[in-house]
Image (cartoon, helix red, strand yellow):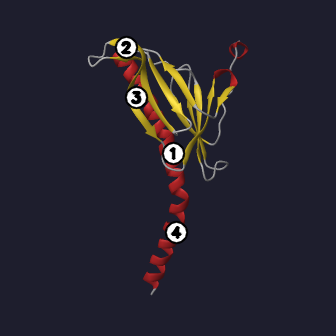
């Protein structure tokens, strides 16, 4: 009888705990997936020595990257257009890109945000706010791409990067 009570108590803790952990795990997984996709694009740009365009699609809740021109089967540039190098990678169900913050205080919460990645793997500093659509006020993560190191960090909550000016270095 005591064994059944202990098993029942353990099961109730597991069921209630898993309901709160699952959305947080999906949220963190989606944030990590964005970081991974950006790192893949940067690596591709460096290894191939080409400029890429990386796209956060806020309508489709996905990201992808492409060459900013058309290529033939051999990879030679043939004219204007796009050559997809990574198909759109969707976020987990119920997870959304709420906003992309760009330099100069420009916040984008609709459409596509396209960033250029140089052949050296450099990309403009920016932040991507990822939310659980069911609880957008409490379940939030911020992916921050540093402009100097291009290092990506994931923070819990809606974290805004402070602007740094010349006076900060005197």
Q: Secondary structure at mark 4?
A: helix
Q: Earlier in the sequence, mark 4 or mark 2?
A: 4
Q: CA distance from mark 2 to mark 3?
A: 14 Å
Q: Which residue is mark 4?
A: 13
Q: Which residue is mark 1?
A: 28
Q: Nearer the viewer, residue 12 or 118?
A: 118
Q: CA distance from mark 1 to mark 3?
A: 18 Å
Q: Position of residue 47 (x, y in %)?
A: 34, 18
Of tags 4 and 2, the one toward the viewer is 2
Q: Residue at x 66, y 29 (%)?
A: 107
Q: Position of residue 87 (x, y in %)?
A: 39, 33
Quarter of the view holding residue 4: bottom left
Q: Position of residue 128 (x, y in %)?
A: 58, 34
Q: Secondary structure at mark 1?
A: helix
Q: Nearer the viewer, residue 156 or 38?
A: 38
Query: How dense is the environment of label 4, judged by Cα within 10 Å: few (below 14), some, or many (20 and up)?
Result: few
Looking at the image, residue 85 lies above or below residue 99: above
Q: How many callouts does the rendering have?
A: 4
Of tags 4 and 3, the one toward the viewer is 3
Query: How dense is the environment of label 2, judged by Cα within 10 Å: few (below 14), some, or many (20 and up)?
Result: few
Q: Secondary structure at mark 2?
A: loop
Query: How dense is the environment of label 3, judged by Cα within 10 Å: few (below 14), some, or many (20 and up)?
Result: some
Q: Earlier in the sequence, mark 4 or mark 3?
A: 4
Q: Which residue is mark 3?
A: 40
Q: Residue furthest right?
A: 167
């Amino acid at each position: 009888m005591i064994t059944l009570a202990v098993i029942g108590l353990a099961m109730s803790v597991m069921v209630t705990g898993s309901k709160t952990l699952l959305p947080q795990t999906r949220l963190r997984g989606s944030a990590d997936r964005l970081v991974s996709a950006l790192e893949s694009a940067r690596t591709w740009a460096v290894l191939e020595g080409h400029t890429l365009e990386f796209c956060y699609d806020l309508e489709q809740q996905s990201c992808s990257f492409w060459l900013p021109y058309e290529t033939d089967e051999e990879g030679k540039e043939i004219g204007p257009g796009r050559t997809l190098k990574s198909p759109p990678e969707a976020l987990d169900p119920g997870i959304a890109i709420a906003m992309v913050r760009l330099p100069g205080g420009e916040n984008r919460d609709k459409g596509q945000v396209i960033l250029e990645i140089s052949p050296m793997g450099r990309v403009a500093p920016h932040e991507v706010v990822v939310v659980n659509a069911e609880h957008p006020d409490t379940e939030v993560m911020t992916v921050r791409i540093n402009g100097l190191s291009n290092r990506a960090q994931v923070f819990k909550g809606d974290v805004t990067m402070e602007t740094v000016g010349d006076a900060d270095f005197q």
